[in-house]
Image (cartoon, rainbow, N blue to C red):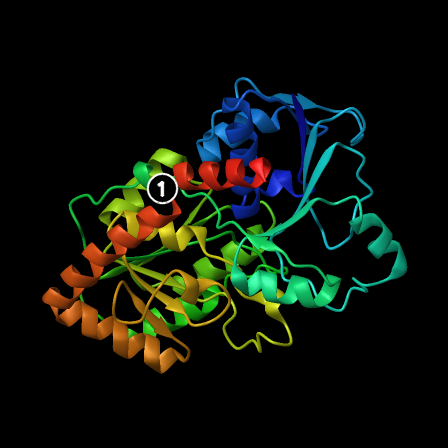
Amino acid sequence: MKAGIYDPYLDTLGGGERYMMTVAECLSKNGYQVDVFWKDKSIKRKIKERLNIKLERINFISEIFNSSGYDLIFFLSDGSIPFLTAKRNILHFQVPFHGVGGRKLLNKVKLRRINDVVCNSFFTKKFIDQEYGVKAKVIYPPVAVDSFKPLAKENIIISVGRFTNLLHNKRQDVLVKVFKKMKVKDWKLMIVGGDEEGKRYAADLRKKAQGFPIEIITNPQFSDLKRFYGQAKIFWTAAGFGVDEEKEPEKTEHFGITTVEAMAAGCVPMVIKKGGQPEIVSEGRNGLLWISEEELIAKTLRVINYQTEWQKLSAAAQKRAKDFSQERFCEEIQKLLNQ
């Protein structure tokens, strides 16, 4: 059997790319010959270095995308609906697109060739179903939870996400501002991520962080990222801060892979109560949710000052993270193909 994978954002090496390349890995393990359409074959090495996904048996072909001759196509949408001609066609949405003319006649015609529409969260599904008139299925993203372990914990708050001023701005500027306000002794904030599309943004954060125990770390190796997570006690994220998620859902975290990674390493997640994050973190059970800067400060200080609460939430977070394993993901992909 022959499968083709297309991701128009492959070179950004973010959560969507981990999703699509894990699909490729799962299919390969299940007997498919897998082709990934991408013009620059060096991306295969970069995927291994950054995402720690092994793709030795997967072909990267530089020809323009063509779905003809394939038993299966798994296609990541950029908001448009492709015309697919494989025997089985699966369309994946990572972003809650809206207001893009999803129910136009031409899209309805193209959707007749799509066997399944898959989303990364129920948050994304809500908007995709409304926009395109479909009934999408939810398969949560794969997270390499077994790769992340608690190490000797230090007084570190960590935030992980790409540096960008574009659509997926993680609002690390808010976290720098909040940490400076907290004025906690013997604690450090680490902000980590790729800067392929945000070198200037990362540089600006460094300026804002000067004089404070704040580290801005760009493009870490996977081994370093594991160590950072393992040492940190608390995980922060602010994507979607100040955003009306009903009007601009695309500016929130649509799921939250880094949240799960941090939880697997024993970090207590303190995530903004928007987007797909509340599907991962349950308030007071395995983490904490916040909306305002003041709420984030108050809840962080509470966990810092009460070790027993940190221990309880850390243990529960590790347990919850196992629900998003790569093994679970591959099983759900296989179930989808067997339907």
Name which residue type carries label 1: Leu
Q: Which residue is mark 1?
A: 225
Disc 1 element:
helix
For the residue pair 155 and 13, the one nearer the viewer reads as: 13
**Residue shown at the point (35%, 63%) measured from the top left:** 281
For the residue pair 228 and 72, the one nearer the viewer reads as: 72
Q: Residues within 10 Å of mark 1 (few under 14, many from 20)?
A: some
**Residue shown at the point (14%, 60%) measured from the top left:** 311
For the residue pair 28 and 53, the one nearer the viewer reads as: 28
Quadrant location, the C terminus: top right
**Residue shown at the point (41%, 43%) measured from the top left:** 143
To which quarter of the image does residue 243 belong? Answer: bottom right
Quadrant location, the N terminus: top right
Q: Is residue 227 visible?
A: yes
* Residue ranking furthest to the right: 105
Percent x, y for residue 19?
A: 53, 42
**Residue shown at the point (61%, 76%) measured from the top left:** 246
Percent x, y for residue 58?
A: 58, 21
Percent x, y for residue 137?
A: 58, 53
The number of discs equals 1
Q: Is residue 153 left or right of residue 192?
A: left
To which quarter of the image does residue 296 belong? Answer: bottom left
